[in-house]
Image (tube, rainbow, N blue to C red):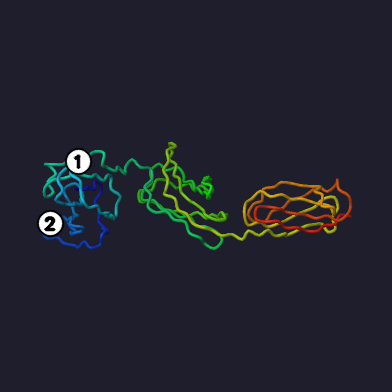
Amino acid sequence: FLFAIFGPSTTFISFSPDTLTSDSTGCAAEGVYLTGNVAGADFEIGYAGPCNYACVTSTAGCGEPHSDCSQFSLTVDVLPDTIRLHAVEGAGNLDSGCTYNSDMMIDFTTLPVVWSSFDAQKQESVVEVSWSTVQEVNNHHFNIMRAGNDGNWERIGQIIPEGNADLGSSYKFIDENPLHGTNHYKIVQVDIDGQSSETEIVSLSFTLDLSLEWREVGPVPLLDYLDVAFVSNIVSPMSLQIFNLKGEKIIEQKLSASYGLNKITLDLMGIDKGIYFLRLKGSQGTINKKILKI
């Protein structure tokens, strides 16, 4: 078989497997070829008329199954317009035997974004999400998506690109509030007409300090209100409760704690003077504090 790369003048940067060697013997003057042998198949890469090409030859006939399969990687310096796969018979003879199949073609000119790389790395207490593109055409924005083990994706950020980028661009986003446990990340690109594409999923494990900590409870002693400040290291629903000395719950307020410092004020107009116990309860534990109203 043979694949042809159509488009701008292209320089081959690398070809894998790296056992291939440079050899210009018998090549056209304008062509620089790489040749080699992997798993019994001979390879040539060079220039052929209007396109750059790579060829793999074997003894398998047209339409016959191949006994061996290999994976190859080709790196070029310019994104081609198309890559087309041909099936051939004979020593590079495209005119007899097998022919070009229109279904076996990648047309890069129709893609709004061609992805290059995507990664997510832990950086102390945050996660740095980074990605790059080879080409951007009519790209409107990127959505940074995250999910936990429950598989529920949520958008945690959005980046608007500067415009079309023929040579691509690089981006970074800092997730300042990663989830405790497994974090799954992906980037969803949205075109100006609403169509979208997305990266593969990258996952990593993150361990957070799940402790709760009082920062402020006052005034001391209490009057008709209570100011409460506490620190939480996760985003989680919580319950703030006040109990009397008999253990009876007299006040309860539900709240959604954010990552970091949280502040809330409770109205104590309806309770008598005396000693009470303040309790903050969440998924990461419970903390208590004795308070006095005069």
Question: Which label lies toward us, 1 or 2?
Answer: 1
Q: Quadrant of the C terminus?
A: bottom right
Q: Which mark is residue 276?
A: none
Mark 2: amino acid: Cys
Q: For the point 15% across and 43% down, which residue is it? A: 62
Q: Nearer the viewer, residue 243 or 13?
A: 243
Dot 1: few (<14), some (14–19), or many (≥20) neighbours within 10 Å? Answer: some
Return the disc, 1 or 2, that comes first in the chain's sequence. Answer: 2
Task: Determine whether, in the image, residue 94 is placed left or right of residue 269.
Answer: left
| Residue 191 spot, x, y in % from top left | 43, 40
Secondary structure state at the residue bearing disc 1: loop
Residue at the top extreme of this rendering: 193
Q: Which residue is mark 2?
A: 27
Q: Which mark is residue 100?
A: 1
Q: Which element is circle 2 on?
A: loop
x%, y% of residue 132? Answer: 41, 53
Seen from the viewer's position, the closer of residues 293 and 8 is 293
Give the CA distance from mark 1 to mark 2. Answer: 24 Å
Q: Position of residue 159 (x, y in %)?
A: 49, 48
Seen from the viewer's position, the closer of residues 158 and 36 is: 36
Residue 287 lies, in percent from the top left, at 72, 58
* Identity of the residue drawn at 43% across and 39% down: 192
